[in-house]
């Protein structure tokens, strides 16, 4: 068996070492890769893979945008790796590949063994005085000068007791210093103490109720996360950390007892569950049947009733749950906060997209969207589809712009922006409004990569908020944002940008959950994503 390790040298980062312990090592800009190159805009989201097959290691390029080389030779599809090979990812990050016949841990121990035995073997067992004496006797016949040389005394090989004592004391002091450093560094974690004072255990919850806490040593607290049976239901970032617990916002909540707890998240992202627990009893009122449902059959056809009634039956908790899934698919490493007002705006706009036929309209553009957004630019699989649905509902006719979106093609891309920013040069003789949408897809994908990767460090939702803005204007807006951008609705203030984000969510949850919106003939957009 052979053992491999990688040394990753990414510009702007300290080099790091990874021992290959799995049969597959994925490499790319997305954070779900084993080797995640988060800030390398030259790397595709899923750029390359190293696969172990027996004693052989193979490198595969996953049709990345900027390619992969080994020792400056391009990798078209796959290449067998040898010890010392130098892999270049997208022209920027370098990865050294090393392989060994023994585990790296054993090899490192072997390489660090002391050379005492070798020094003993190399040293002569003949006393130095005898050597010098022999040399002197050999030179005696050469003349009196040699006889007048002073006798050479061999140096003592014994250490002074003072040196030994000093070394012992020094070693003890060093051990004490290291122990103190480890003790203090381990004790510098967040020591905040949080106790829930309201509601108290035994409280019956029938509607929205305030959560209040007593907090001590909160200097390190970034926010408090309130959980019901281990599931997040609210959070607060500002002292005194009050929040509202609303049963209507909790998906799947059943009547009975549930446990409320609080978790502290410090400024480094570390989370500590507090020991305090509050047991609450929930009484959930059952919705009364609507009188209009009893008479609906006489006034409209079955399919029309289903399309119009089903969205109205979705609760705020359902909208929140679907929106959270959408966020997880787009950016699993970012913990966004969905404000109640944002959820209300999302729900209000789902009616614009809950119209039959969106899947059949999107299907002809499957190849151009997958090629431009995923294969060429390395963006999220869902991004191109949801963005197109939010702006045109996959309808190329000019009278079907959704909301305030104006422009050309499925993405309603402004022609002047495409020309001024230089994106239109990619199209040759084709245009943004061509029926095949190849030009529009190339332009929209390149523009989204510039926003998401270059301006917002891999954050797709803030890139969506800027869609249609000149890159220079988007950069100026970004520079005015706070460092903590998790609370989308309170960070994004401009009405036009809020509209883009709300419509993106509305289109995304309808496109992925058509059955819940009464669109029985449509399939989820994810059926069109590349596999």
Image (cartoon, rainbow, N blue to C red):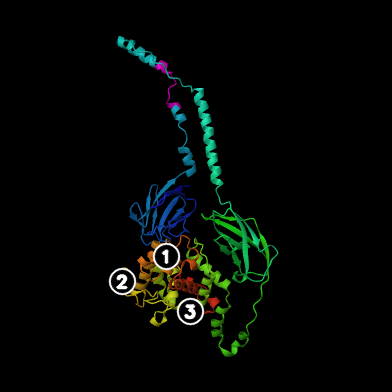
Across and down, in percent, residue 56 comes to: 44, 51
The spot of residue 78 in percent (x, y) is 39, 57
Q: Are marks 3 and 2 in contact (CB under 8 Å)?
A: no
**Which of the two discs, 1 and 3, labels the residue nearer the N terminus?**
3
Instruction: Choose top left, top right, bottom left or bottom right for residue 180.
Output: top right
Q: Which residues are magenta?
A: 120-131
453 relative position to 168: left or right: left
Instruction: Give yes or no for residue 232 being in the magenta stretch.
Output: no
**Nearest to viewer (mark 1 / mark 3):** 3
Residue at 30 percent across and 11 percent down: it is 145
Q: Secondary structure at mark 2?
A: helix
Can you identify the residue that label 1 sits on?
Answer: 379
Crowd band around label 1 with a 10 angstrom C-alpha radius: few (<14), some (14–19), many (20+): many
Q: In the picture, residue 366 is in which quadrant?
A: bottom left
Q: CA distance from mark 3 to mark 2?
A: 30 Å
Q: Residue 306's spot in the image, x, y percent?
A: 56, 82
Q: Which residue is mark 2?
A: 419
Specify whether 251 is left or right of 167. right
């Amino acid at each position: 068996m052979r053992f491999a390790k990688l040394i990753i040298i990414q510009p702007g980062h300290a080099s790091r070492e990874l021992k290959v312990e799995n049969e597959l090592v994925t490499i790319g800009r997305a954070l779900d890769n084993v080797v995640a190159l988060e800030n390398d805009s030259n790397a595709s989201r899923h750029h390359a893979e190293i696969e172990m097959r027996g004693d052989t290691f193979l490198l595969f390029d996953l049709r990345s945008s900027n390619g992969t080389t080994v020792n400056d030779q391009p990798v078209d599809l796959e290449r067998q790796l040898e010890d010392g090979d130098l892999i270049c990812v997208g022209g920027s990050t370098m990865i050294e590949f090393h392989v060994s016949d023994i585990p790296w841990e054993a090899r490192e121990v072997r390489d660090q063994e002391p050379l005492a035995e070798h020094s003993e073997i190399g040293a002569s067992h003949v006393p130095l005085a005898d050597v010098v004496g022999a040399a002197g006797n050999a030179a005696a016949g050469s003349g009196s000068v040699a006889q007048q040389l002073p006798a050479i005394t061999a140096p003592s090989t014994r250490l002074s007791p003072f040196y030994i004592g000093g070394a012992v004391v020094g070693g003890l002091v060093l051990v004490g210093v290291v122990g103190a450093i480890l003790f203090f560094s381990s004790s510098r974690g967040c020591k905040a103490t949080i106790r829930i004072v309201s509601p108290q255990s035994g409280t019956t919850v029938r509607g929205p109720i305030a959560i209040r806490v007593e907090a001590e040593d909160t200097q390190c607290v970034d926010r408090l996360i309130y959980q019901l049976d281990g599931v997040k239901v609210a959070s607060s970032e500002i002292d005194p950390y009050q929040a509202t617990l609303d049963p209507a916002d909790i998906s799947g909540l059943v009547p009975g007892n549930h446990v409320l707890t609080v978790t502290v998240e410090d400024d480094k992202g570390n989370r500590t569950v507090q020991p305090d627990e509050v047991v609450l009893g929930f009484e959930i009122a059952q919705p009364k049947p609507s009188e209009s449902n009893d008479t609906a059959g006489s006034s409209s056809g079955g399919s029309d009733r289903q399309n119009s009634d089903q969205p109205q039956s979705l609760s705020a908790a359902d909208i929140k749950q679907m929106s959270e899934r959408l966020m997880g698919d787009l950016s699993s490493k970012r913990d966004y906060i969905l404000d109640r007002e944002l959820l209300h705006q999302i729900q209000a706009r789902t009616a614009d997209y809950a119209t039959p036929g969106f899947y059949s309209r999107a299907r002809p553009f499957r190849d151009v969207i997958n090629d431009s957004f995923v294969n060429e630019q390395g963006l999220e699989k869902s991004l191109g589809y949801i963005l197109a649905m939010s702006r045109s509902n996959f309808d190329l006719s000019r009278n079907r712009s959704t909301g305030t979106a104006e422009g050309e093609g499925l993405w309603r891309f402004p022609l002047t922006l495409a020309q001024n920013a230089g994106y239109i040069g990619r199209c040759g003789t084709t245009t943004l409004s061509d029926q095949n949408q190849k030009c529009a897809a190339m332009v929209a994908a390149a523009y989204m990569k510039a926003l998401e990767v270059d301006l917002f460090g891999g954050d797709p939702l803030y890139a969506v908020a800027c869609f249609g803005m000149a890159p220079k204007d988007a950069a100026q807006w970004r520079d005015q944002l706070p460092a903590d951008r998790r609370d989308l609705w309170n960070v994004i203030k401009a009405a036009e940008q809020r509209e883009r984000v709300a419509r993106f969510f509305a289109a995304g949850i309808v496109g992925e959950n058509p059955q819940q919106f009464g669109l029985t003939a449509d399939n989820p957009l994810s059926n069109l994503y590349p596999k």
